[in-house]
Image (cartoon, helix red, strand yellow):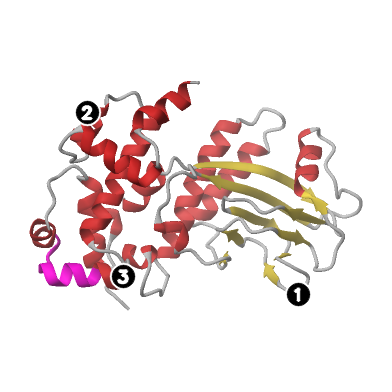
Amino acid sequence: MSERLNQQKSFDVLGDVLETLHFRGSIFFRSDLAAPWGMSLEKSPFPKFHIALSGECYVGADANDAVRVQEQDVIMLPNGSSHWISDQPGRDLVPSSIAGDACELNTPLFQEGKITNRLICGVIQFDQEMSHPIFDALPSVMLFTGLSSSGPIWSMINLIDTEMNSANNWNAGVVDRLAEVLFIQLMNHYVSRVDDSTGFLAALSDRRVYRALSLIHKEPGLDWTLSLLGERSGMSKATLVRRFQEVLGVAPMRYISDWRVMKAYNLVKYTVAPLEQIADSLGFSSSRTLTRAFHRHYECTPSVLRKSIAK
């Protein structure tokens, strides 16, 4: 197991990646439930999560693949695979969209009998045109159990629940922002405990690789060379290349070039900054150089992308 890094004292690489991917959180279901109950969720390109506020439930891809989710557990499906959630395996299932609509109309389903569960369900969306290895590194199912009721994750969940419990006056914008913070907290929690030796999450917990990533993400426009990056991250050029290949499966300079183009995509799509300014801030020698790199990655030019958005 590699040395851990006190990430609170260095640049927030995870936060930078998520911000660049234009990630957004959303809570699409919250309700008290009386057994028997069950919902089906269609496949989605985005991670979905379920919070068992009270009572235990089960989540699975089919009837023979059930994960027990105990009270105060959180379960996440990062690849957005189709699944079901119910108080017990084998229940009749109602599409979650129907159950969610019923809640919004103040006619929630599964209310007959004694309340056995309180459930919150959410989704994390991001710009699908941008691809980063962070989501490839996540397992198909992530179960967060044994969470402290006084810890930061459950404190954030309580804030979400309290806001949504404010009759009809809860603010969707506030709840969505809280869901985004919760997702970051869950990712940090997972990274601090992951035992993977390869992949982006392993890179976040490897002291030397994380130091190099922090430098890259903090100053993507710097004229990086292997010598400079190795010197600032405390590694020889050979060690730097070897560690990146071992952990991330990519050379340092390739990671830098891919990250610059991804940052450029974000700035082209979500800001009105001039192309020359974007190119200069990200270390491209000119807007033409940026345009060529942009086209190689996204098969369109920055100007075409902006025109398509303006329509």
Residue type at mark 1: give it.
Asn
In reply to whether residue 57 is colored magenta, the answer given is no
Q: Nearer the viewer, residue 48 or 152?
A: 48
63 shown above or below 261: below
* Residue at 29%, 73% in the rendered image: 246
Q: Position of residue 196 (x, y in %)?
A: 40, 73
Q: Give the range drawn in magenta.
A: 233-243
Residue 234 among magenta residues: yes
Mark 2 to mark 1: distance in Å?
55 Å
Q: Where is residue 155 in the image (x, y as percent from the top left)?
A: 52, 50
Q: In the image, 300: left or right of 4?
A: right
The label on residue 260 is: none
Label 3 or label 2, whichever lies nearer to me, is 2
| Residue hosting label 1 | 64
x and y percentages locating residue 186 in the rendered image: 48, 57
Q: Mark 3 to mark 2: distance in Å?
A: 33 Å
Q: Looking at the image, do the residues carrying marks 2 and 1 touch, with CB atoms under 8 Å apart?
A: no
* Mark nearer the N terminus (1 vs 3): 1
The quarter holding residue 167 reads top right
Which residue has dot 3 on it? 247
Name which residue lies at 54% across and 63% down: 147
Residue 249 seen from this side:
yes
Q: Quadrant of the N terminus?
A: bottom left
In three-dimensional space, the C-alpha distance between marks 1 and 3, rounded to whole angstroms, equals: 34 Å
Element carrying mark 1? loop
Q: Disc 2 residue type?
A: Gln
The residue wearing badge 2 is: 277
> Mark 2: which secondary structure?
helix
Residue extending farthest top: 311
Secondary structure of the magenta portion, mostly? helix
Query: Looking at the picture, how far across and down is residue 195, in whole percent?
Result: 41, 75
Q: In this view, does 85 lie to the left or right of 112?
A: left
